[in-house]
Image (cartoon, rainbow, N blue to C red):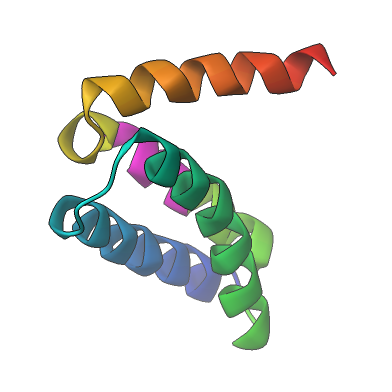
Amino acid sequence: MVVGGAGIGLLLAWIFVQAHKRLPTDAPSDIALTLIEPYFMYWIAEQLHSSGVLAVVIGGLYMSSKRLVFLNSASRIRGTAYGRALFLF
């Protein structure tokens, strides 16, 4: 479960980073995709009887380390503002 969850999270995060780099996206679509991707990681890992939580943690750490590669400046600024707005509620 542990190795499977970590591997699935890392693999899916790599796929998502490659998709972000290749797709023509703008800031709102980047924010929407980065909000949906952890749920997708969790669901796939659970369907394969692995740790969904670990998949999300490992995938999120990988994607956050690569955020400067696949997100442009507008996406990073708007994403930070959106994240702060979520904590107000």
User: Could you tell me residue 75's position as x and y percent?
Assistant: 34, 28
Residue at 24% from the left image edge and 20% from the top image edge: 73
Q: Nearer the viewer, residue 64 or 74?
A: 74
Q: Position of residue 59 (x, y in %)?
A: 44, 53
Task: Note whether 60 is above or below 80 in the view shown.
Answer: below
Q: Residue at x 53, y 14 (%)?
A: 81
Split into 4 quadrants, where in the image is the N terminus?
Answer: bottom right
Q: Quadrant of residue 74?
A: top left
> Which residue is at the front of the view, 88 or 42?
88
In the shown orientation, is residue 78 left or right of residue 47? left
Q: Does 35 sit above or below residue 7?
A: above
Main secondary structure found in the magenta portion = helix
| 47 vs 27, nearest the viewer | 27
Image coords of residue 67 (percent x, y): 29, 34
Quadrant where the C terminus is found in the figure? top right
Q: Residue furthest right?
A: 89
Question: Residue 13, located in which quarter of the rendered image?
Answer: bottom left
In the image, residue 24 sits, relative to residue 72, either above or below, namely: below
Q: Is residue 65 left or right of residue 44?
A: left
Q: Is residue 49 left or right of residue 64?
A: right
Q: Nearer the viewer, residue 50 or 63?
A: 63
Confirm whether the magenta stretch covers residue 76: no
Which residues, given as a range, are shown in magenta? 59-65
Q: Is residue 55 above or below residue 76?
A: below
Q: How many marks?
A: 0
Q: Residue at x 47, y 25 (%)?
A: 79
